[in-house]
Amino acid sequence: MSKILIGHGMEIVAIDDIKSFLEQMGEDFVMEYFTATERRTSESGVNRIQYFASRFCAKKAVLKALGLELQQNSFWLEIEVQNLPTGEPSVVLNGKCQEIADRLGLTKLLLSISHVSAYAAASAIAISKSSQALVLS
């Protein structure tokens, strides 16, 4: 059975934008967009801002890959970005977001994350093995 591309999403954000969100919203920003595990895993100082910026990008890229960008406010806490023991990023979906992924026939989400001092970026590719997968445009 061949693999089918369901969707691809990319996102880039300026680190200063995330820094501004943190300054304006404080911990409310962190609580609204990041799971308890992601909050525990975050670092401190500048690295903390880069960490949250890269995870924010990853979540937006996943939403785009699943065709959910227009409904993004409903799903921030249902997407969790983790690291495998190898350091490779991975995605865990929960709740309604997982239900939608199941409906799409999602079998794998490939995720790439990068950041430098000024920007964070992420790319997500959603793959299905099913020839009956529903492809969102």
Image (tube, helix red, strand yellow):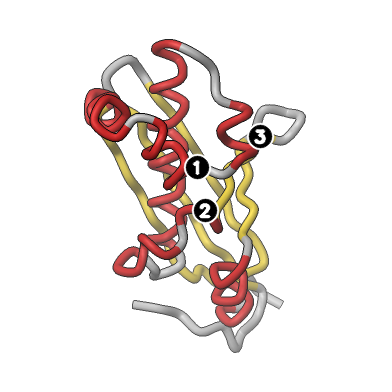
Question: What is the x, y in percent for residue 72?
Answer: 36, 62
> Which quadrant would residue 42 be assigned to in this image?
top right
Mark 3 / mark 2, whichever is N-terminal: 2
Residue 6's disc number: none
Label 1 – label 3 distance at C-alpha: 15 Å
Question: What is the x, y in percent for residue 136?
Answer: 40, 78
Mark 2 / mark 1, whichever is N-terminal: 1
The three-letter code of the residue at mark 1 reads Phe
Mark 1 / mark 3, whichever is N-terminal: 1
**Which mark is nearer the camera, 1 or 3?**
1
The residue wearing badge 3 is: 83
The residue wearing badge 1 is: 34
Nearest to the observer: residue 61 or residue 94: 94
Q: Residue at x 46, y 54 (%)?
A: 76
Q: Residues within 10 Å of mark 1 (few under 14, many from 20)?
A: many
Residue 77's disc number: 2
